[in-house]
Amino acid sequence: MLQRQLFVVAICMGLALVAAYARAAERLLSRIAFGSCCKQDKPQPIWNAIVAAQPDLFLMLGDNIYGDTQDMQVLRAKYAQLGNQPGFLKLKATCPILATWDDHDYGANDAGVEFPRKRESQQVFLDFFGAAPNDPRRTGQEGVYSAQVFGPPGRRVQIILLDGRYFRSPLKTGTRSAEPGEGFRGRYIPNSEPGTTMLGEAQWTWLERQLSVEADVRLIGSGVQVVADQHGSETWGNFPQERERLFRTIRDVGAQGVVFLSGDRHLAELCRLPPGGKNVVGYPLFDVTSSSLNEPSGNFTRAKTRFANEVNPWRVGLTYFDTNFGMVTIDWSEADPVLRLQIHDEQGETVIQQRTTLSVLHTAP
């Protein structure tokens, strides 16, 4: 009798999952919000502005809590603090939430492949974000990377969330050469040693397959910045051969409409890497960085001064140092759909924006 009941439950869950994917395929995304870096034990008033912005989807790009522990009971308790925040509960009732992690919710500051409790931490992450029992991340996949496509043909948005922690090789520290007054540089230098990786081979294979899926807009979420590569804090630029591989993969697969979304920095900025040189993709690569949801660098005068003088030749416009969230809006009504890449403040006002069209994010025929 018990086995029959369990069988019925499993069938129902499977049907529910099929229905959920069917709804996702039909859901047209026009407003995708995102953010990172949330102190679970501090007030989070920004959720009110995010809910008021009426997103179709919200992406959590890492440091969703500050776990920093190898004790899974402590980690669960910290997730519970986030889960009990009234504003976060409102958001869950407003729209679906998809997530990846960064170092602090992974388990330790700047941690990578060496973190000893990553398997256990992955299960806690999946429990909190409600991953289904048959989710690949529960049934054998190492790492929390995931992808999903929304919308009808001709207006499809693919969300790809990378895991830059589970397999990432150790960082390399050192001093970057810089002329006086050139700008602040952090403690990490490029690591080009053979065998170093950001994603690991299994995730690279998966990513190439995902980039081959039919989609019009592809939003690739990364815990750390992709385009900014000179500031010496955590970035894809710490592993230049992996950054080059990412761009080559996008080019070789022929993936169009790619925009990067990132977090981590406790500041917000928008970067644009023009085609040519390091960018072999064939069209401009934008990276919209949103951080923090409730612990911005603007709260700390010394940090704000440091970041204001940070090296980033790819930055478009100014850096924003206060609490913020990101938004990508897509106007599908235009013959050439219009994308607005935005940063919003705690009141929901737009403080950074880059307008582009979908045709700009395509290689020339």
Image: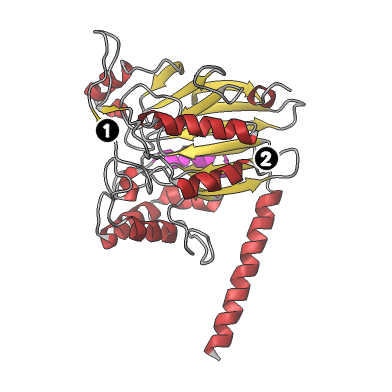
Of all residues shown, which one is farthest toward the bottom? 1
Coloring applied to the structure: secondary structure
Residue ID for mark 1: 172
Neighbor class of circle 1 (other Cα within 10 Å; few <14, some 14-19, many 20+) is some
Q: Which amino acid does label 2 sit on?
A: Ala
Query: What is the magenta range?
Result: 45-57
Give the mark, 1 or 2, whose residue is nearer the N terminus.
Answer: 1
- Is residue 94 shown to the viewer in this render? yes
Task: Give the structural element (helix, strand or loop) at label 2.
Answer: loop
The residue nearer to you, when weighing 62 against 145, is 145
Q: In which quarter of the image is residue 324?
A: top left
- Inter-mark Cα distance, 1 to 2: 36 Å
Q: Is residue 320 above or below residue 215?
A: above
Residue with the mark numbered 2: 215
Question: How many callouts does the rendering have?
Answer: 2
Specify whether residue 53 is in view. Answer: no
